[in-house]
């Protein structure tokens, strides 16, 4: 999952070539880390 650097639109990118943000047309993206789900043991 990537986010547009300009507007923050989430974009799923398979190939990083010729990818344009569907909302604003920006071409720079940054990777979004999936939040790690931690399981907490209930004692
Ligand atoms: Zn954008």
Image (tube, grey):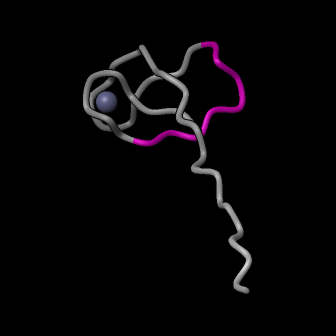
Residue 35 lies, in percent from the top left, at 57, 50
**Residue found 68% across the figure and 71% down from its top:** 40
Residue 25 lies, in percent from the top left, at 32, 24
Q: Quick check: 19 above or below 21?
A: above
Identify the image quadrant of residue 10.
top left
Q: Which residues are magenta?
A: 10-17
Q: Is residue 35 left or right of residue 39?
A: left
Viewer-nearest residue: 40 or 32 = 40
Q: Quadrant of the N terminus?
A: top right
**Residue found 53% across the figure and 21% down from its top:** 19
Q: Main secondary structure of the magenta part?
A: loop
Figure quarter occupied by ligand 1? top left
Q: Is residue 31 left or right of residue 14?
A: left
**Residue found 64% across the figure and 52% down from its top:** 36
**Residue found 63% across the figure and 13% down from its top:** 17
Residue 18 lies, in percent from the top left, at 56, 14
Q: Is residue 43 left or right of residue 9?
A: right
Identify the image quadrant of residue 26.
top left
Q: Quick check: 31 above or below 23?
A: above
Q: Quadrant of the C terminus?
A: bottom right
Residue that extends furthest to the front in the rendered view of this protein: 43
Say if the magenta span includes residue 15. yes
Viewer-nearest residue: 24 or 43 = 43
Q: Is residue 22 left or right of residue 1?
A: left
Q: How many marks?
A: 0
Residue 23 lies, in percent from the top left, at 30, 37
């Amino acid at each position: 999952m990537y986010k547009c650097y300009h507007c923050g639109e989430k974009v799923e990118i398979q190939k990083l070539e010729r990818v344009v943000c569907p909302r604003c047309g920006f071409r720079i993206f940054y990777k979004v880390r999936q939040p790690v789900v931690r399981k907490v043991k209930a004692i």
